[in-house]
Amino acid sequence: MKICLIVRHLSAKAGGIAVYTRNLIRALEREGHAIELSPEERFSYLLWQFLRVPLWLVRSKCDVYHAVGIIEGITLPLFRRRAEKRITIHDIIPLKHPRKGFKGLFERFFIRLGLISARKCDVIYAVSHLTKVDLVRLAGIPENKIKVVHQPIDERFFREPLGEGKFREPGKFMLGYISRMDYHKRHALLVELFKCWDNPNARLLLAGAGEEFERVRKLAEGDPRIRLLGFVPDEELVEFYDSLDVYVHTSKYEGWGLPIAEALGRGKPVIVFEDAEIPREVKDLCVTASNNSFSDIVEGLFWNRKLLRKLSNRRCLG
């Protein structure tokens, strides 16, 4: 079978959807399918969405067309009405937690366009039950049209032996967080909570880039225990997780939570926050904290190394 994938970016800098796409390509190729990719976005999203993708759709000849994200599938039903159409929806964060200003309006407009197109697809894949519930409740999509398929992590997170990561400081208690620095990821909250934890032997590694980077950098100034690593390439992700004693994910909302799954795959205890909307199948494997209890939890793990080792021996989400 020949499958056409509508893809904006394949670079790891594009975030979780790009990782999902690369894993999907590998899985489909192992099953013997032929894969054709749409042109990637280069200079302009609007040019890509309303010119390059439609031209490619008209010229392509595939058995199945699969949009790897909600806005990737906007024009699919218009130009491939009779073909089998599939779409993966990771989350609808811009509708649940809208940001202010023109950028927020722009995001919501295209998410709504994507939902209109998704209704015309034959199959809608949601990466978690939480995303499925959101699609039924907020988008009015029939429940029987949505299939939940959890986002897998790369096999190397289980295959490579556990070791000391390149970012680790010997003799220090290492916390870390990796995510694009967007408004709902709450990096600033983690910096503020960490600064309140008066432990000279603790370190916090923040990996990622994005619109919140400068704000987070300014908040971290004056505390030498905090290191901003910037973008960490895909080939160094295992090294990043292996550098940590505890992984902390402060995001307010996740459609799935790929970094959480990756950290669990590397056998790291994961702390998430009680008020975060994270799929239950992931959140139940984590330690939950509140703003008030965070310092006590990390202090307890710092001193109780037996508990830390016990939590670190759980390699989950295969």
Image: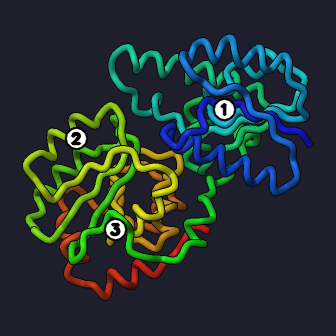
Q: Position of residue 150 (x, y in %)?
A: 64, 54
Residue under label 1, please give it.
7
* Residue at the spot 58% in from the left edge and 41% down from the top edge: 18
Helix, strand or loop under label 2: helix
Q: Residues within 10 Å of mark 3 (few under 14, many from 20)?
A: many
User: Tags 1 and 2 in contact by the CB under 8 Å rule?
Assistant: no
Q: Quadrant of the N terminus?
A: top right
Among numbered discs 1 and 3, the one appearing first in the sequence: 1
Under mark 3, the amino acid is: Leu
Instruction: Look at mark 3 in the image and give the residue it sits on.
Output: 244
Q: Disc 2 and disc 3: Cα gap in Å?
A: 20 Å
What amino acid type is highlighted by mark number 1? Val
Q: Position of residue 250 (x, y in %)?
A: 33, 51
Locate residue 281 relative to residue 31 in the image: left or right: left
Drawn side of residue 188 relative to residue 130, left or right: left
At x 78%, y 38%, the residue is 123
Q: Quadrant of residue 302?
A: bottom left
Drawn side of residue 150 relative to residue 183, left or right: right
